[in-house]
Image (tube, grey):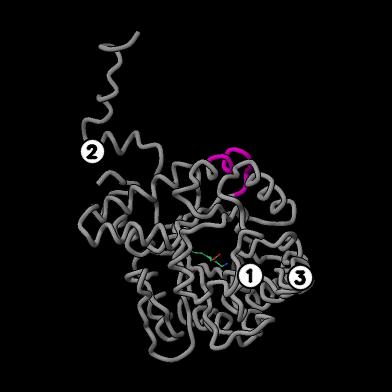
Amino acid sequence: MSYPIQRPRRLRRTALLREMVRETRLDPSCLIYPLFVCEGKGVRREIPSMPGNFNLSIDMLVEEATAARDDGVTALILFGIPGSKDGQATGAWTDDGITQRALAALREKVPGMTLIADVCLCEYTDHGHCGVIVNSEVANDPTLELLARSAVSLAKAGADIVAPSDMMDGRVGAIREALDLEGLTQTILMSYAAKYASAFYGPFREAAGSTPQFGDRKGYQMDPSNAREAIREVALDIEEGADIVMVKPALPYLDVIRDVRDSFEVPVAAYQVSGEFAMLTAAFERGWLDRERSILESLISIRRAGADLILTYFAREAARLLSRRSPGRADG
Ligand code: PBG
C-alpha cells in the first residue's frame, strides 16, 4: 500500500516536526578544534590557504582556546611548529618542546577543555617525513621508539589524549606500552587508524611546514582505492590498545567511516581536513555556496556516515551556529 496512504511529506511540514523526527544530530561536544602552535610571542600569522586559521604563539594560543571554549568548543587538538628541525625529530619528544609547553600553558590557563596532542614526526624532521630515514627509506621500527617517547612526553605535559598520525605499523602498541610503563594508564589513545595518502592535506602542510622534501607518503599512508584495508588497519589498532579510531579525510571517505562504524564498537572520529576546509572556504569567498548551511550540512553528513567525533577547522563557527539554533538543527 503506497500513496495516498503513505505521505512522507507529512513529517516534513514544519520545522518542529522535522526536528522531532531528525535521525542525526550535531552537538558542539562532538567537535574537535585543530590549532597550530609556534614559537614566539604575540604571533598570530594567518595561514594563506586556510583563512581564519593561524600559526599561534603560546600566549595567542591561550587566547584562541579561551575564545573557542566560550563558543562552546570542548576539545582541541594541537600541532606543534618547532623553531628548528633535525633528523631525529628532537622537537617532538623533548620535554621542553613547543607542544609540551603549549599543553602546560593550556592546562593552567584554560581549564575545562579536553586536550589532544597529535603525535607525529613530520613537523619536526628536517626532511618532512613522518619517520626516521634509514637507507633513503622511512624506517618503521626505529621510528616507533621516538613516537612512544613523544607520546609519553606529551601525556606528561598535560595531554588527555594522544593521537598518532604517522601510520607506522605497530605504533599504537608501542605507545600504549610506553605509557603504561610510565604509569600513564589513563591516557586515551586516539589513532589515525585509516589515514589515506590524500591530496587534501595540502594546506595543512603549508600551515605546519611539513611537506616531504623528497618522495611522498604513499609508502605509509593508505591508498585511496582501498576500503577493506581500512578495516584491517582499525582492527590492528584496537588490538594494540586504541580507545578511539579515526578515518581521515572525511567527506571523500564517508563510505569508509560507515564501514568502520558498522564493524567496531569503539568511538569513531573523522577528520574534515585542511583541503576540505579550503575547498569550502574558497567557494564561500566567491559567493558560490552559502557558508552557514554548507558548514552544517558537511558536518551532519560526516555524523550520518557514522562518526561520533569530528575534527574540523569549522569547530568554533559551528559551535556558535549550533548554540544560536535549536540543537541538532542542520537544515538552515
Ligand atoms: C601529520 C598530520 C597531517 C595531518 C594531520 N596530521 C599531514 C600529513 O599527513 O601530511 C593533516 C591534517 C589536515 O590536512 O588538515 N602527519
- Residue 246 in the image, given as x and y percentages of width and height: 57, 54
Residue shown at the point (29%, 61%) measured from the top left: 282
- The prevailing secondary structure element of the residues shown in magenta is helix
The mark that comes first in sequence, 2 or 3, is: 2
Q: Secondary structure at mark 1?
A: loop
* Residue at the disc numbered 3: 178
Image position of 113 with respect to 98: above or below = above
Estimate the spatial distance between the alpha carbons at disc 2 and disc 3, rounded to whole Å: 52 Å
**Mark 3: few/some/many CA within 10 Å (<14, 14-19, 20+):** some
Secondary structure beneath dot 3 equals: helix
- Horizontally, is 231 left or right of 320 in the view? right
Depicted 281 relative to depicted 96: above or below: above
Question: Can you give x and y, in whole percent of width and height, for residue 260 in the image?
Answer: 59, 43
Horizontal and vertical percent position of residue 235: 69, 47
Residue extending furthest bottom?
41
SS for tag 2? helix
Q: Give the mark count.
A: 3
Examine the rendered structure and indicate whether residue 125 appears above or below residue 175: below
The answer to whether the residue bearing label 1 lies less than 8 angstroms from the nearest atom of ligand 1 is yes
Depth check, front residue: 280 or 159: 280
User: Which residue in the protein does label 1 denote?
Assistant: 130
- Residue 62 visible in the snapshot: yes
Residue in the foreground of this view, choosing between 113 and 31? 31
Disc 1 marks which amino acid? Cys
Magenta-highlighted residues? 258-266
Mark positioned earlier in the residue sequence (3 or 1)? 1
Circle on res. 15: 2
